[in-house]
Image (cartoon, grey):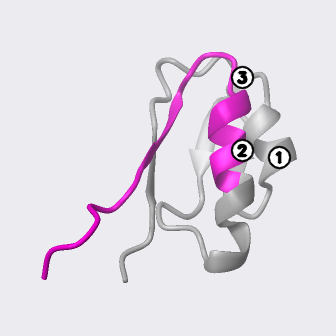
Amino acid sequence: MRTPRLRVDRERCISAGMCALTAPAVFDQDADDGRVLLLHAEPPTGHRAAAQMAAGVCPSGAITVHEPEAGGS
């Protein structure tokens, strides 16, 4: 079973910090410029819902979630 994969666009990030507040085990903020830092591109099971929520609340849309393809072998 494949897990969702996260990607961040640091150029698009506006340093709002919603990601780090919503899913601190998955995202952080750069100490120098405040932009998003991705800690886990494939978040552990217990943090997936928070990671997906963080992507949804990101005001700049800098976080994307790529769901694995269904089916196939």
Q: How many marks?
A: 3
Q: Residue at x 69, y 18 (%)?
A: 59
The answer to which of 72 and 47 lies nearer the viewer is 72
Upstream in the sequence, badge 3 or badge 2? 3
Relative image position of residue 45 (x, y in whole percent): 63, 77
Secondary structure category for the residue under label 3: loop
**Disc 2 and disc 1 in contact, CB within 8 angstroms:** yes
The residue that label 1 is drawn on is 22
Which three-letter amino acid code belongs to the residue tagged 1? Answer: Thr
Secondary structure category for the residue under label 2: helix
The magenta-colored residue range is: 51-73
Up the image or down, 44 lies above or below 20; here it is below
The answer to which of 30 and 2 lies nearer the viewer is 2
Furthest residue toward left: 73
What's the mark number on residue 53? 2
Up the image or down, 45 lies above or below 69; here it is below
Q: Is residue 30 visible?
A: no
CA–CA distance in space, label 2 to label 1: 7 Å
CA–CA distance in space, label 3 to label 1: 14 Å
Furthest residue toward front: 71
The answer to which of 15 and 67 lies nearer the viewer is 67
The residue that label 3 is drawn on is 15
Upstream in the sequence, badge 3 or badge 1? 3
**Of labels 3 and 1, the one closer to you:** 1
**Disc 3 and disc 1 in contact, CB within 8 angstroms:** no
